Image (spheres, rainbow, N blue to C red):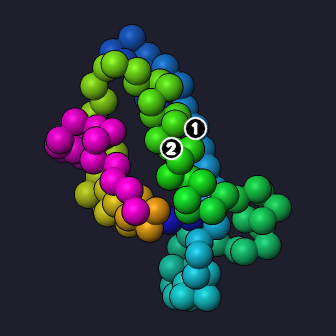
Amino acid sequence: MIDIGLVYTTLEGIIDSMFLRIQPEHPERLAPGAQKVNAYDPQAWEKLSAVSPRVAVDSISNFHNSVVSNRSALMIAYNSWFDAAFLDHLFRSAHKTWRHLFYYFILDIPS
């Protein structure tokens, strides 16, 4: 995962949002086709103040907890299971889980 954007809403509108650039731990493993699709560039990410995966996990968790408080949150995304797999891998790299952040099922926008 090289970046993540989160937008938290209610039926009334947007509550808050965040965006993070994430410096991957092994950029040398990037396949040329993937680089062409996502435009990852190590020097650009450094200039954009990309954070480590561990810092990203802590930032996402802290942001979530500050926004959600005692409410439930539902993950909704375009191609949600694809995104959930990347989120899962990111959190596992920090020996954590993201599953407690959101309600147990995930909705896909096209659905």
- Numbered circles on residues, count: 2
Q: Quadrant of residue 48?
A: bottom right
Stretch of the chain drawn in magenta: 95-111
Number of the label disc, if any, that sits on residue 3: none
| Circle nearer the viewer, 1 or 2 | 2
Q: State which tag comes first along the sequence, 1 or 2.
A: 1
Q: Residue at x 22, y 36 (%)?
A: 103
As drawn, 39 above or below 111? below
**Residue at 46% across / 62% down in the picture?**
94
- Contact flag, marks 1 and 2 (Cβ < 8 Å): yes
Q: Considering only vertical position in the picture, is 10 above or below 77?
A: above
* Residue found 38% across the figure and 56% down from its top: 96
Q: Quadrant of the C terminus?
A: top left
Label 1 and label 2: CA atoms lie apart by 8 Å
The residue under label 1 is which amino acid type? Met
Q: Report the side of 44 relative to 55 (left or right).
A: right
Disc 2 marks which amino acid? Ile
Q: Identify the residue at the far front of this view.
A: 95
99 drawn magenta? yes
Q: Is residue 10 left or right of residue 1?
A: left
Is residue 78 found inside the magenta-colored segment of the image? no
Tag on residue 18?
A: 1
What kind of element bears circle 2? Answer: helix
Q: Is residue 81 above or below residue 64?
A: below
